[in-house]
Amino acid sequence: MDFKIIHIDETDSTNRWLRNSSGTVLNESSHENSLGIVPSELCVVADYQTAGKGCGSNSWESERGKNLTFSMLIHPEGIPANEQFRITEVVSVALCETLEPYINNKVEIKWPNDIYVGDRKICGILIENRLQGATIRDSIIGIGLNVNQRVFLSDAPNPVSMYQLTGQETDLDALLHQFLAAFGRVAQTPTTSSDYRARLFRKGIPALYEDSSGRFKATLEDVETDGRLVLRDDTGQVRTYAFKEVQFII
């Protein structure tokens, strides 16, 4: 999978930048390409995001030039809208595979798509799928990866960076290319769904959660194919949740 990579100094959100600019970029590329082939996969990388966003109302803190804040535009082939969680699985597993050689700790996926080392968040993902009929037309995948930031000043409860874990700075461009290669590889791997589940944060471990009825203890058992989380509480009852219907108590 080949990406046209665009570096920009600053934007409010790389997801929004791609959503607003992708058509123009592709048209320009078609004129520049002597073979007449328009690259359909784009990746925009920003040195700084003024309004980096996580899922829902969450914000993302990132010091200028220290981390990887980027978005990808991809065109999945033949993925039905009701199977869009497959994209989350691919991105999450590819990030784990990219980070594991650098970090001497287990890299895990906190459902649905935060990347954790221990109890601390090193990466967040925001995926926006656009539909055409019953299939996915394209996906914009935003990623904020904490790389070389040494201190976090926001009220985010548990951020961590690669530098804080390793004591070493990491080349951002090299890391980006390693991730894009991993993404292309994982997208072609038939075991991606099982790899995602094998890396789940807290899988098989009793822990605290909270839903609209209050806090409870449960064990994470599985994630369904549509992305819903399956917990078994300490009374033996199975509880199934869609995104934002339950919180992990860290």
Image (cartoon, rainbow, N blue to C red):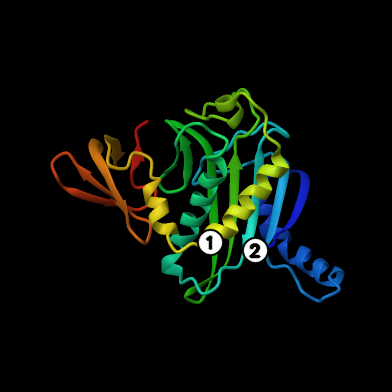
Question: In terms of depth relative to the viewer, which is nearer, 214 or 141?
Answer: 141
At horizontal 49% and vertical 41% (from top left) the residue drawn is 115
Question: In terms of depth relative to the viewer, which is nearer, 179 or 137?
Answer: 179
At horizontal 56% and vertical 39% (from top left) the residue drawn is 101
Return the x and y of residue 11 as percentages of the image width and height: 72, 45
Secondary element under disc 1, as helix, strand or loop, is helix
Return the x and y of residue 225 as percentages of the image width and height: 36, 61
Secondary element under disc 2, as helix, strand or loop, is loop
At horizontal 78% and vertical 47% (from top left) the residue drawn is 8
At horizontal 56% and vertical 59% (from top left) the residue drawn is 185
* Residue topped by disc 2: 1
The relative height of residue 80 versus residue 144 in the rendered view (above or below) is below
Of the residues shown, which amino acid type is indicated by label 2? Answer: Met
Which callout, 1 or 2, points at the residue further toward the start of the chain? 2
Of the residues shown, which amino acid type is indicated by label 1? Answer: Ala
Question: In terms of depth relative to the viewer, which is nearer, 62 or 20?
Answer: 62
Question: In terms of depth relative to the viewer, which is nearer, 175 or 29?
Answer: 175
Tell whether 31 sits left or right of 230: right
Q: Quadrant of residue 35?
A: bottom right
- The answer to whether any part of residue 15 appears in the image is no
The relative height of residue 248 versus residue 166 in the rendered view (above or below) is below
The relative height of residue 188 versus residue 212 in the rendered view (above or below) is below
Return the x and y of residue 187 as percentages of the image width and height: 53, 61
Tell me the crowding category of disc 1: few under 14, some 14 to 19, or many 20 or more residues within 10 angstroms, Cα based: some
Tell me the crowding category of disc 2: few under 14, some 14 to 19, or many 20 or more residues within 10 angstroms, Cα based: few
* Residue topped by disc 1: 187
Labels 1 and 2 touching (C-beta < 8 A): yes
Q: Quadrant of residue 211?
A: top left
Return the x and y of residue 147 as percentages of the image width and height: 63, 34
The relative height of residue 100 versus residue 188 in the rendered view (above or below) is above
